[in-house]
Image: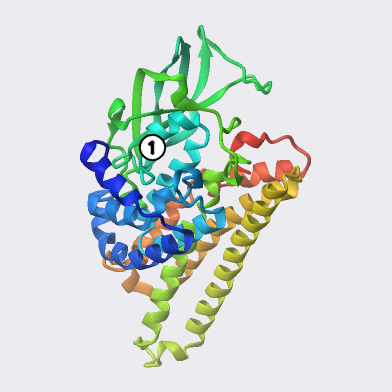
Amino acid sequence: MSGSVVGESMDAAASDYLDAAEILSRAKRTSAALREHAVEIEQNRQLPQTVVELLRGTGVFRMAMPKTWGGPELTSVQQTEVIEALATGDASAAWCAMIGADSGIYSGYLQDSVAREMFPSLDMVVAGFVNPIGRAERVPGGYLISGRWPFGSGVTHCDWLAAGCLVYRDGELEPDTDGDPTQWRVMMARPSDFEIHDTWHTTGLAGTGSRDYSVSELFVPEEHSFSFAIPHREGLLHRAPDAIVRKMPGVPLGVARAALDYVRSMAATRVDRTTGKPWAESYRVQMTIAEAEMDLAAARSAVFASLERQWHGLADAEPQTADERVSTALARHKAFQTARSIVVQLFNLVGGSAIYRPSPLDRWLRDVNTMCQHADAGVQSLQSAGELLLGGNVPQKTLLW
């Protein structure tokens, strides 16, 4: 969604400064509207333009934009709180917000003059798959990139599309400056430069529009590419390369919160058909709700405590221990798994009525199952954490920690 009309509307939105408290307040207020659009979002298999503008109006896409540009430059904790609030309304919208808000982070890996030109508004949206599965052949002035990338969440409404590549020179892999035998760079281009493939027919998170996209020998100027190992901006969002994933647990935490609130509200008036006993007086219901609240509180505390510790550690600029490096990744993984466990428990508690599509529990169950297939929620992230804790050499630029 680029172009002069959109650009003008975004510039107008960017003229008013929004701080962390205001963005979070707007996100909380917007969650109710997202809930009303949830069925439409899922049926469309992408965010309707009205929903994109709702999100833009919260300020979520500018969360990581630098203060030197007039942005709020929210901390990782503050960003996660915003995503969590949006996820109580709709998981797909929150997921796209989480991805789209990386604009400010990516801009810090580009030369400032180039980034200002690419992001004339604070509220522009990025999408794309940054893992290096594409090929970038070095040519004078830049690269010719080719490949096909999956999971382009937000590709249907983004302003810039990122594509992770390995760099080649004269047909051979080009080593990185840190001695790594391969060089990983992220290429930035307009979505109109790629072919978008309508592949996103999924169990859950259907509204993210996370389609495949491909290109053959697209020229990308050197200045429109970057390495996560070489930031061009000071600040704690760029002192470690994991900033784009720190806010991710806000999505499962928000969905679990929404599901719990929904069932607790239901329990206030529901009566067991067999026994005639009010749900609020049922031992089974009481125990399920209490255990779910306990598990959510523990998972949420782990996420925010680990993010706080990481932030203070980055501010001190001290080398991180292995335990410090994995703490946010482990808490993030646990948030996904806990959210799924909670929604499954509540789905089972509600019983047969939960299986019908009008029930949000059905959608939440499919959403959490799908998001738990993400690499950060899977076994591989745990294995890498264990390897590091046992003395293994896990590169910092893997983006896990």
Task: Judge by depth and name the residue closer to the eye, 152 or 99.
Answer: 99
Q: Position of residue 236 (x, y in %)?
A: 61, 46
Quarter of the picture holding the N terminus: top left
Q: Position of residue 65 (x, y in %)?
A: 46, 45
Task: Judge by depth and name the residue closer to the eye, 164 or 26.
Answer: 26
Task: Judge by depth and name the residue closer to the eye, 225 or 346.
Answer: 225
Q: Is residue 46 visible?
A: no
* Colour scheme shown: rainbow
Q: Position of residue 22 (x, y in %)?
A: 42, 63
Q: Residue at x 52, y 33 (%)?
A: 109
* Residue position marked by numbered label 1 in the rendering: 119
Left or right: 383 in relation to 139: right
Quarter of the picture holding the C terminus: top right
Q: Residue at x 42, y 69 (%)?
A: 259
Question: 297 above or below 38?
Answer: below
Question: 108 above or below 90?
Answer: above
Q: Position of residue 62 (x, y in %)?
A: 42, 49
The amino acid beneath tag 1 is: Phe
Task: Judge by depth and name the residue closer to the eye, 52 or 141.
Answer: 141
Left or right: 175 in relation to 122: right
Question: 92 above or below 182?
Answer: below
Question: 137 above or below 191?
Answer: above
Q: Is residue 140 visible?
A: yes
Q: Secondary structure at mark 1?
A: loop
Quadrant for residue 242, please give it.
Answer: top right
Left or right: 396 in relation to 237: right
